[in-house]
Image (spheres, helix red, strand yellow):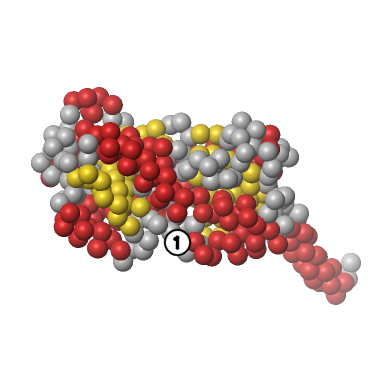
Amino acid sequence: MRRREFFMFLGGAAAVWPLAARAQQSALPLAGFINAASAQSYAPQLAAFLNGLDEIGYVDGRNVTIEYRWAEGHNDRLPSMAADLVRRQVTVIAATTTTAALAAKTATTTIPIVFSIGGDPIQLGLVAKLSRPGGNVTGVTQTTTELVQKRLQLLHEMLPAASIVALLVNPADRDIAEVSIKEAQSAARALGLELHILNASTERDFDGVFAKLIQLRVGGLVVAGGAFLSSRSEQLGALALYQGVPAIYRGREFVVAGGLLSYGASITDAYRLAGNYTGRVLKGEKPADLPVQQATKVEFYINLKTAKALGLNVPAAMQARVDEMIE
């Protein structure tokens, strides 16, 4: 081969190879991932989701392409984000957080949806039955709202002398807020406690919330779930410690940041299971045939250093049940 012809051959090959690579990449199945919070605040959950997907044999960028949509705490962005994923004709939508799942369900009745939420999917209208969801939606529930009663009971066990408590909710997460309030009111009545409902939809609301706690002479605080409050759990834990407020939430990160207690289903386990289901849908299974799973792994954490700082003694019965005492 002559020198000129050789270089012409190389030039032609160089032009073909990128086209071939792009064609191969475009041939990969396309999955959508939509979440009401941010990638930074949900990094552990996303890692768990990708691990669950990997367990079924899918790795982003290798044999599946994932289109990510993060609303950064702006729920009003979710409908257009879900509609965009539908326009891109993704094979499946992983809708993590309740508001994202509701937006995805509104956007499509045909593309499979796998959710990871903290509420009751039947009550939210996502599925008809847990065992046979029907339609195009299935997923995993963390029973976040159902555990609000248990959190209030644990807080009362730690603070038996406290007669006034508060529940912090995000009114923008209306479905989670309403159910959490109902659960907390029921538990407060049973325990003979005075309950106050406080609202926070932005970080700017936090200072007012903690000022109100002092004004009301609240003895303890229960923090509800939802994407916004979940993504600010470390900030809330640090604020609770700084303000000297005994508080309980659902996740370990809250306790590590200085919060007193946490009790709830493992959110990372729920995201791993959602990754499993997303992989199974990519393999051809139908959401209608996949029963809604419940993340049954419940974790209980206590920050012993915070308890000492607040002048509290951890009852022996609680120490026997705790998964980890953080010092």
Side of 141 relative to 249 (left or right)? right
319 in relation to 40, above or below: above
Q: Which residue is mark 1?
A: 73
Q: Quadrant of the N terminus?
A: bottom right
Coordinates of residue 181 in the picture (x, y in percent): 36, 46
Coordinates of residue 185 in the picture (x, y in percent): 32, 42
Q: Residue at x 51, y 50 (%)?
A: 98
Coordinates of residue 69 in the picture (x, y in percent): 56, 60
Image quadrant in which you'd find residue 4:
bottom right
Q: Is residue 230 visible?
A: yes
Q: Identify the residue at the far bottom of this view.
A: 4
Viewer-side residue, 7 vs 306: 306
Coordinates of residue 83 in the picture (x, y in percent): 65, 61
Q: Residue at x 47, y 64 (%)?
A: 74
- Label 1 packing within 10 angstroms: few (<14), some (14-19), many (20+): some
Side of 79 relative to 244 (left or right)? right
Q: Residue at x 82, y 69 (%)?
A: 12
**Amino acid bearing label 1:** Gly
Q: Is residue 259 visible?
A: no
318 in relation to 38, above or below: above
Q: Identify the residue at the far right of this view.
A: 1
Side of 317 relative to 273 (left or right)? left
Number of numbered discs: 1
Viewer-side residue, 268 vs 176: 176
Q: Secondary structure at mark 1?
A: loop
Q: Residue at x 68, y 38 (%)?
A: 134
Image quadrant in which you'd find residue 145:
top left
Q: Quadrant of the C terminus?
A: top left
